[in-house]
Amino acid sequence: MEERRKKLLVRSALVGGIVGVVIATKSKQGVCSCLKEYYEKTTDILKFINENRTEIIEQLKNTSDKVTKTIDETNKDLKAISENVKHLKDSSTEMITTVQETKNQLFNLYQTCKQKYEGSTAEIKN
């Protein structure tokens, strides 16, 4: 029985080794083909960049200028909005004060008129 186990162990090791070599070879080939594909794509991209360098740089500059202008305009708009909000806040405070003063003046005027009216009606009754 020991001999049978030894033969089975040798066969298993042999089959395992063959399967391992096949898998390693296939995965190695897969990795190599993948790397080759990426190399070719990278080479194509670099060629395109070298052939169109000036156009790419010009487009990047134009885009950068547009972004800079947009940011500047946005900053100006934000400053204007901030100033308007501050002005509205100050104006609303002034308006509240003016309305309160007007209310007080109208109340005083009402009281004065009421006193004069009550005084004149009291004289008429007497």
Image (cartoon, rainbow, N blue to C red):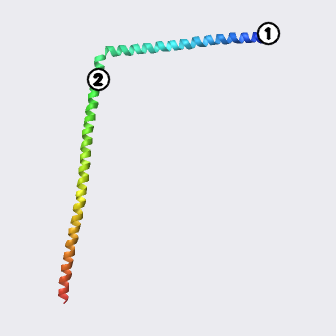
- Image-quadrant location for residue 116: bottom left
Lateral position of residue 97 relative to residue 3, left or right: left
| Residue 92 percent location from the top left of the image | 25, 56
Q: Quarter of the image for the C terminus: give it.
A: bottom left
Who's the residue at 26% across and 53% down the image? 89
Give the residue pinned by disc 1: 3
Lateral position of residue 17 relative to residue 30, left or right: right
Q: Which class describes the residues within 10 Å of circle 2: few (<14), some (14-19), or many (20+)? A: few
Q: Which class describes the residues within 10 Å of circle 1: few (<14), some (14-19), or many (20+)? A: few
| Residue 30 percent location from the top left of the image | 53, 14
The mark lying in front, picked from 1 and 2, is 1
Q: Identity of the amino acid at label 2?
A: Gln
- The local secondary structure at tag 2 comes to helix
- The local secondary structure at tag 1 comes to helix
Give the residue pinned by disc 2: 59
Lateral position of residue 27 relative to residue 110, left or right: right
| Residue 6 percent location from the top left of the image | 76, 10
- Decide: is 31 above or below 99: above
Residue farthest right in this picture: 1
Closer to the N terminus: mark 1 or mark 2?
A: 1
- Decide: is 106 above or below 93: below
106 or 37, nearer to the observer = 106
- Image-quadrant location for residue 121: bottom left
